[in-house]
Structures are given as C-alpha cells and as structure tokens.
Image (tube, rainbow, N blue to C red):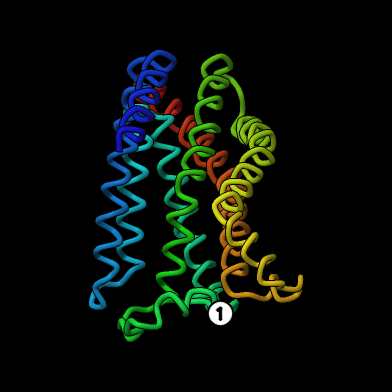
Amino acid sequence: MSVLVWLAIILFILMVVIGGQKGARSFIALFFNFVILIISILFMADPSIDPIIVTLIATTILSCINLFYINEINIKTKTAFISTMATIIALLLFIIFMTESAMIQGFSEEQIEEIKGFSVYLGVDFVKIAASVIIMSTIGAITDVAISISSPMREIYRHNPDISKQSLFQSGVSIGKDILGTSTNTLFFAFFGGYMALLIWFIDLDYTFGEIVNSKIFSGEMVTILAAGIGVALVIPITSWVTAYVLIKSDVEEEEEE
C-alpha cells in the first residue's frame, strides 16, 4: 500500500510542477473517473438496469469531468463535448452490432476454469455489457482527440477570423491526421500490454496461431482495439465540422447583434 501512496504522491507532484493548476485538476479528475467507473459497474450488475443507458450516462459524466472540469467551460470544450457524445452514440450502435456478430460476449474457455464454481445465470445481457466495456475503454482517447483538435482550431480562427468554414474544417482534419497515427498506436500498445501475460500463457499451453486468433478472449481484445481506432478516426471529422460550424456561427451572431 505504501508503494501505491508514494507513486500517487510522485505523480501528483509532477503533474502540479509541470501542469500547474490544470495538472492538479487532472490528478483529481483521475479519482473522479475511478469513482464513476466503480458506480457504473455496480449498476450494470443489476439485471433490471440497461447497461447501455448506464454507459451513456457514465460517458457523459466522464466527458464533463475530463473536458469542463480540467479545461473549464469555453467554446473549445463545448465543441469537444458535442463531438465526443456524437461519436460515442454512433460508435455504440456499431459496437453492439459487431459484438453480437463476433460473439465475443460472455466468458471464454480460459475463464471457465476459474468461475466453474459460480452460477453463470446472472440475468444480464452480455452483448450490452461487452459493448459497454469497449465504450468505457475508448472514451478517454476520444475526448483527448476531440480537445486536441478543437483547441488548435480555436487558435487558428482567433489569428485568422476571416477564414472560411471549409478552410477551417480542412485545418481541423489536417490536425487530426497528425494525431490519428499516434493515438491508434497508443491504444494498441495499451490494450496489448495489459494482455501480455495472456499471450505468454497461450504460448505455454502450446496454442497454435489459429487457436490464438480464434479464441474468444483474443478476438474480444482485437475488437476492442479496432473499435477504439474507429472511434478515434471518426471523432476527427466530427470535431472538425462541429468546431468550424460553431466558431463561424458564433462570430456571425456576434456581428448581427452589433
């Protein structure tokens, strides 16, 4: 426990020294996010509650914390929030279909041995649970990309107020192209790093390449990675369009009021 405390202290000091007040808020936001995730899991365990509704509520709160609490309420965070929620809704519908088609919901053969002493008649929809897990895994990356695009677009517009909506949109997409590669690679290594022990176990069990690829737990991980990449790619044009539309429209409204 003392190691965890010291690591938390070191992280807090570094975030405050480097990020100042915003760094302190980011550190506090980590605990807020943790609490929201724990509460969401408790609600999802109730068969009478729809996991998709819980996911939408949780992702909305998480987006508000990561955008409005850390970066305050302004036009950049507002457009990033709208873009994030639009991407999540579109991605959620797609993931539910893909989860059911790929049949990655429920427990894998590797996990059955550990839970064989427990009842599996939980009464929850594992398709929706699997979709919720994927969305929860990607929400951080999607909000990060959204604010990373809306913020520089706001600076571009501030220094060049005569820019057209189309040009501003193309600037946002161009910024997104630079972010896309690093973000997808970050997601890939983050997810695979967490399952490195599983891959070693597969090798120890003398699994063939075909058995590894066709195992439910490996397929579920790959679907999560691919869905996260799709979400990151999808949020780029959505954020670029929403930000360009809001910035140009807000300027036009201000001129009309004057």
Q: Quadrant of residue 221?
A: bottom right
- Residue 13, percent from left and from top: 36, 18
Judged from the image, the secondary structure of the residue bearing numbered disc 1 is loop
Q: Residue furthest right?
A: 209
Vertical relation: 224 (above or below) 21: below
Task: Give the residue at mark 1.
Answer: 103
Q: Nearer the viewer, residue 226 or 84?
A: 226
What residue is drawn where x is 43% and y is 30%?
76
The picture places residue 238, in percent across and down from the top left corner, at: 55, 46
Quadrant location, the C terminus: top left
Q: Nearer the viewer, residue 142 or 208?
A: 208
Residue type highlighted by circle 1: Met
Residue at image coords 67%, 66%: 204
In the image, 219 versus 25, the foreground residue is: 219
Q: Nearer the viewer, residue 126 or 147?
A: 126
Number of numbered labels in the structure image: 1
Q: Position of residue 235 (x, y in %)?
A: 55, 47
Please report the residue visible at 44 percent of the width from the left and 37 percent of the height from the top. 79
At 49% across and 37% down in the image, what residue appears? Answer: 144
- Say which quarter of the image contains residue 172: top right
